Amino acid sequence: MSTGIDIVLAIDVSKSMLTRDFERNRITRMSAARETAKVFSHSRPNDRMGLVGFAGRPFVSSPITLEHEWLRSEIDNLDPRARELPGGTAIGSAIATAANRLKEREAKSKVIILVTDGANNSGRIQPLEAAKLSSDLGIKIYTIAIGSAEGRLSDRIISNAKQEFDPETLQKIAETTGGEFYHVKNTRKEFEKTFETINQLEKTETKIRSTVETTEYHHWFSRAALICSLFALLAQALRPTPGPE
């Protein structure tokens, strides 16, 4: 029996996630986020995990489940080009959607891991309002900002590139709920180290119920003793009675 943690991964799938600034411009932010999230799910087999994607609005990609193979297949399907989503970054709505999946859960610990490379500019609820509601529900949020050291997008991705993310808001989201804020710049190792830190902070309490099987051998000895007794009685019965001297 295991008592794991319920976790929802909320991952940004806006067009800016196609920026190639990881591993010396060889892979996109989306690819780095997908691969690291899958490794993280492998490391927590006893935890129930769900998946929410978001751009200008959020969508539930996977319910909270222990079927991690299914979860990883849904992580693979996250692609900014695969869905017709409105532009923008709805961080507050993404948090609210993830929290809504967790609020009725009976897990001792509930966690949202929010991965984004943008500042909130869409949605019906502000990020800090969503964070406060999450905190009231006992949900902790870890925020991970993705972006280059300069903190700016390339004009090849969007016109009039602006500051990629709002570190102050992301930090307040984490602080409001008792989580942590991280900035991942341009290597997969940074991403992996961040998820490993969260992995260490959110320990799973696992109780193992073991069953001991015993094999009974005493009946073999009982049968042998019974057979020996029968032979002794038979021998005594067949022995002739000695005559008088």
Image: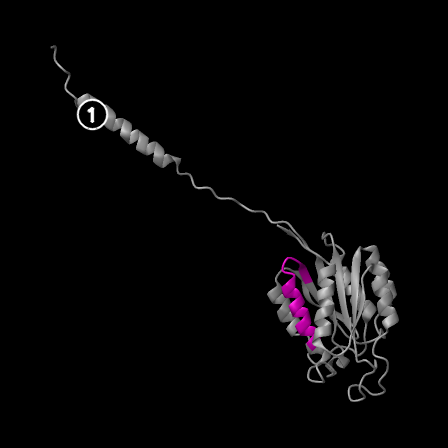
Q: Position of residue 230 (x, y in %)?
A: 26, 27
Q: Position of residue 134 (x, y in %)?
A: 82, 59
- Magenta span covers which residues? 32-49
Q: Quadrant of the C terminus?
A: top left
Q: Quadrant of residue 95?
A: bottom right
Q: Position of residue 224 (x, y in %)?
A: 31, 33
Q: Nearer the viewer, residue 216 or 176?
A: 216
What residue is rendered at 72% in x and 61% in y? Answer: 200
Q: Relative to residue 62, is residue 244 drawn left or right?
A: left
The answer to whether residue 231 is above or below residue 164 is above
Q: Quadrant of residue 23?
A: bottom right
Is residue 38 within the magenta segment?
Answer: yes
Q: Quadrant of residue 117?
A: bottom right
Q: Nearer the viewer, residue 154 or 229?
A: 229
Q: Amino acid at mark 1?
A: Ala
Q: Is residue 125 visible?
A: no
What residue is rendered at 68% in x and 62% in y? Answer: 49
Q: Would you name the residue on which mark 1 appears?
A: 235
For this orientation, the residue located farthest to the top is 244
Is residue 10 within the magenta segment?
Answer: no
